[in-house]
Image (tube, rainbow, N blue to C red):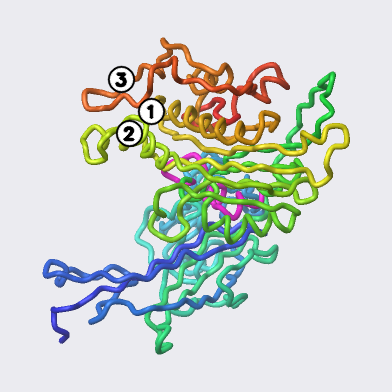
Amino acid sequence: MPSKEGLYSWHLSLRVDRPVEGCTMRPHAYMYGKKLDDRDMEKPLAPHSKKCREPPPEHEFSYRWFRGPRHEACAYESCPRRTSFSPHDWSMHALGGSGCSLQCMSNQSSLNRCIFCNSRCFIEAWKTQKTVSIAGIEEAKGGIGATNGNGNSNSSTGGLSGGYPSGSSLNESVGEPEGGGWTEVCRDQVYIAAADDTGRKLKLEAAAYSVETGELLMHRVVETDLVLSRAPDPAKRSLVAAKIGGGSGGARFRIVTYNILAEIYATQQQYPYCDFWALSWDYRFQNILREILDVSPDVVCLQEVQADYYENQFYAAMSEAGYEGVYKQKTRQSMGLAGKVDGCALFWKRTKFHLVESYSIEFNELAQRHASQVLGMNPRSEDCVSYLNRLSKDNVAQLVVLELVQPSRSNRDLNQVCIANTHLYSNKDFPDVKLWQTWQLLQELENFVLSRGSSLPLMICGDFNSTPDTAVYDLLSHQAVHPGHPDVNVNTGDDGPNVLPDAISITHSFQLGSAYQSVMGEEPKQTNFTQLFKGGLDY
């Protein structure tokens, strides 16, 4: 019997997203240990856990992927999901149901053990079911839906058995895949679901081995839901063009700004009306990349680019398409694991521009500098701490100077352009913070641009999290804000500091105009469209 002193529980977490044809599947495997105290000793261990005398050693994973047999997805003959595995048909909302599969468990029904993809399908099928005798049960077991999809039989006690929501990992087990018809298809960490996988389930086995000894520490197997076929490409956007008379003779180029929604924010809790497969990063990445490249931009400004995906995916994909880029992640630390923090990315086409200068701006750092050098605050004072707490939201901005690869012959003084890319604080209850960030960004840009001569053109792109009726928009468009604007007079409570100076001081000298407004005569009705918010935030 092991001593109670120094015992640890080891846990192996393994998850994989809903598979879609053509999308890369990346396992989320994580092994960790927890030191047990007296209260934990008598508690039963959770599944996929064990007790050991030492914490988990340094380890690495090996993976095996298996393809399952084909089986009928729904026993209701009129269900479109019997023959189609389009993500659109398999949306949890497509048939008006919950996205939860059901299995009939009535011994005296001809539908006994039949699986239905949706409650509505079960209700419709039940209208045609027949009562069978006990002697006919064995014969009924051999019909449609006689197994639960894993090759296993379940004893029945009557009533209905609820399945898991569409898209979640199902029927986890440890060891080799059970039942017949499972074929090993890959031993790499990642797997790209192929056309042959459509309509089948996959199983993933992850095994953790000690780096030092090679000993098998733990292993686990999870089963996915059915592999969906490749979804149709989204409709191509129609670009709005405007004829601009009396051109200045300067170079023409195309620029794109896009908040791509980092994976760490694309959760079912935040977007409960979206299916798991639609939120998965690898599915969205293919669509995002295609849409960007379809526009064929010369400059691309992106927000909410996750650090690990910039390094592992985005930079390589954009580089292959002919772009060079720089990245700046937010000031805060990653959310649990390395790379799980978002930031801004800026790319330019190599055949159009080359990089002259590149800088980044951290608004946390600007707040600290402003508090000490401008306001003369004592860093240890309560006022300073409160001031910095209000303004330190980890947002960042990028600043580059790009030069044309082929200089303009008509005007050689306009061969460079300064481009800024930013993502301001998102909380709607902090309009003063967004205004302060915008003001400080413009101050930094003024110092930078004017020090290099007034002829350097400037473009600012980003997600400003501000609608056209905000002080942020007014400051950018009109060089100043009205003293009576609500965003300038925010009530932060008894303990909240006033972080803004007098409105007369919130100014800048740039002649800026919205590209949307200039081309279309008005701002677009939406650049952000969700269930809870619809409006323009990006410029």
Residue found at the far right of this picture: 409
Element under disc 3: loop
Say if 349 sits above or below 190 in the image.
Answer: above
Of label 1 and label 3, which has the lower sequence position?
A: 1
Q: Callout 2, which amino acid?
A: Arg
Task: Read off the residue under disc 2.
Answer: 390
Task: Read off the residue under disc 3.
Answer: 491
Residue in the image at 14% along x and 71% along y: 42
Residue 44 lies left or right of residue 451; in this view the side is left
Per the model, the C-alpha gap separating discs 1 and 3 is: 10 Å
Say if 182 sits above or below 473 in the image.
Answer: below
Q: Callout 1, which amino acid?
A: Phe
Find out whether the residues at labels 2 and 1 contact each other: C-beta distance under 8 Å.
yes
**Front position in the image: 23 or 471:** 471
Per the model, the C-alpha gap separating discs 2 and 1 is: 9 Å
Q: Which stretch did the figure color magenta?
A: 266-287
Say if 249 sits above or below 482 in the image.
Answer: below
Element under disc 1: loop
Task: Read off the residue under disc 1.
Answer: 430
Of label 3 and label 2, which has the lower sequence position?
A: 2
Q: Callout 3, which amino acid?
A: Asn
**Dot 3 crowding, Cα within 10 Å, few <14, some 14–19, many 20+:** few
The number of callouts visible is 3
Residue in the image at 24% along x and 32% along y: 383
Question: Toward which corner of the image does residue 299 lie, by quadrant?
Answer: top right
Element under disc 2: helix
